Image: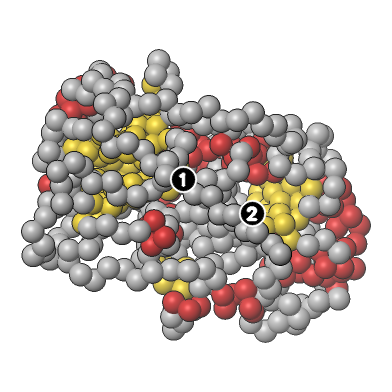
Amino acid sequence: MVLLCVLSSNLLLSKDRKDDCLDVTNLSAKIEAAVPFNYTSTSSSQVEEVVDHQQKQVDRVEPAPAWRYHGYDTELKHIAFGIAASSNLWDIRKEYIKAWWRPNETRGVVWVDKRVRARSDGGLPEIRVSQDTSKFKYINKQGSRSALRISRVVSETLKLGMKGIRWFVMGDDDTVFVVENVVRVLSKYDHTQFYYVGSASESHIQNIFFSYAMAFGGGGFAISYPLAKELAMMQDRCIQRYPALYGSDDRIQACMAELGVPLTRELGFHQYDVYGDLLGLLGAHPVTPLVSLHHLDVVEPIFPRMKRAKALEHLLEAAKEDSASLMQQSICYDSTRYWSISVSWGYVVQILRGVMSPRELEMPTRTFLNWYKRADYTAYAFNTRPVERHPCQKPFVFYMNKVKYDRARKQTMGVYYRHKTRSRYCRWRMASPEKLDSVVVLKKRDDLRWQKSPRRDCCRVLPSDKNNTMIISVGNCRGGEITELQPKKGSS
């Protein structure tokens, strides 16, 4: 006989706490004025005035129990980037590389098919021409022989003999890396062992055509040094055995199969085999570090009314203040106005009328199209939800305009402005987020968040003296805190 005991507890946060607000006195002085994308009705000084009037304190996050992180001391200097580039697209795509490359810090090489004009502006890595691959067979009529050259990027980078390298990271010229998060992810693994780290495509069809066991190189993948050495010794023989394969990534995976090394999945490497607007994907990022973005030429700029490269630079400005939390989602509710709120830190805040469950809000909205445009929503390799058609359920979107770190209070402060578009009339008799012009997001940095078990951050709506500004606190969840609507006393 087996006795199953189910213990339950009611550890809900009290809605009557008087100390549930951050000390945000004079925070406005810490947020620099900036011109928003399409912001006209409320000035930055008015936003600052709202923050200045707050006088309460939020409970400090309860200290986590003692834990020990078993990681490795991998640093940026231990990683070599091999970037596959095309001479035909170099003038456009070099701007993507400039957005994330750090001269004198990042190490690596751009490999091109033929010489390109390279100005000595110090903002790019070394550029080299790939070795000749004409001796290798290639019989795929739908592909390009450049796949052979690109498949050898890691091996050619290894042969340069750079000292102190533990990992080789492969990417394309239209791949943008968040280098701090590359380090965080690779620090979890023993670089003296064989590791092949990356992720699959967002398109189920792409994964079927190629392989779910394959890392898609546009999103980037990492190979440990000892595995790269083994690969370099056998790769030329290996790729001769697969002349019919389409691309470079499937050739790498074929060689990994011969070596007996499986793919270690890290969901923060993003291939983004999609078209359209990435808002739905980036606004509901999985609980994992954002490592890379890809296919930036075929999707819309991630910030409206900005050029693509400029929009990426803008995003990485937020990463400078808290790279570990970039794109991390938190969900909360305005219990007075019955709004659902989703914060993608450093990127966007979305506010909807009514109460939508966390189960729905953490699911990406289909603001994008599949790589195979005739395919429907069943062709994605993850769950999605449709874009809301009802005029009252359309989200109001506030894009990040400025993030600044307050050293005195050890927290970041960001201002997000509403992206103003025409909306259909809503007949619901309830408060509308349309009256908000800005959202201020306050957050304490947690550089060690990925050394603990993964958990989504919690957020709380703080009082505001201005009807056109909302203030939100984002941070670690307190003991017993869950994401639920807690109606105020006297509300019905």
Q: Residue at x 34, y 27 (%)?
A: 58
* Residue 125 seen from this side: no
| Label 1 residue SS | loop
Does residue 82 sit above or below 261 in this rendering? Answer: above
Instruction: Give left or right: position of 137 versus 283.
Output: right
Residue 421 appears in the rendering: yes
Instruction: Measuring from the top left, give residue 145's x and y in whole percent.
Output: 70, 72
State whether residue 306 is above or below residue 14. Answer: below
Residue at (77% x, 59% y) in the render: 152
Against 98, residue 286 (above or below) is below
Toward the viewer: 143 or 388?
A: 388
Mark 2–mark 1 CB contact (< 8 Å): no
Residue located 46% across and 82% down the image:
375
Quarter residue 84 falls in? bottom right
Q: Which residue is mark 2?
A: 266
- Residue named by callout 1: 9
Going from the N terminus, do you reach mark 2 or mark 1 first?
1
Q: Can you say whether 473 is above or below 193 in the image?
A: above
Q: Residue at coordinates 20% horizontally, 42% vertically from top-left?
A: 488
The answer to whether 168 appears left or right of 486 in the picture is: right
Residue 299 is left or right of residue 158, and the answer is left
Q: Residues within 10 Å of mark 1 (few under 14, many from 20)?
A: few
In the displayed structure image, the side of residue 325 where residue 124 appears, left or right: right
Between label 2 and label 1, give the one nearer the viewer: 1
Q: Quadrant of the N terminus?
A: bottom right
| Relative image position of residue 440 (x, y in whole percent) | 28, 35
Question: What crowding class fits label 2: few (fewer than 14 Cα within 10 Å), some (14-19), or many (20 or more)?
Answer: some
- The amino acid type, in three-letter code, at marker 1 is Ser
Report x, y in % for residue 283.
39, 54
In front of the other: 421 or 458: 458
Residue at disc 2, secondary structure: loop
Q: Amino acid at mark 2?
A: Glu
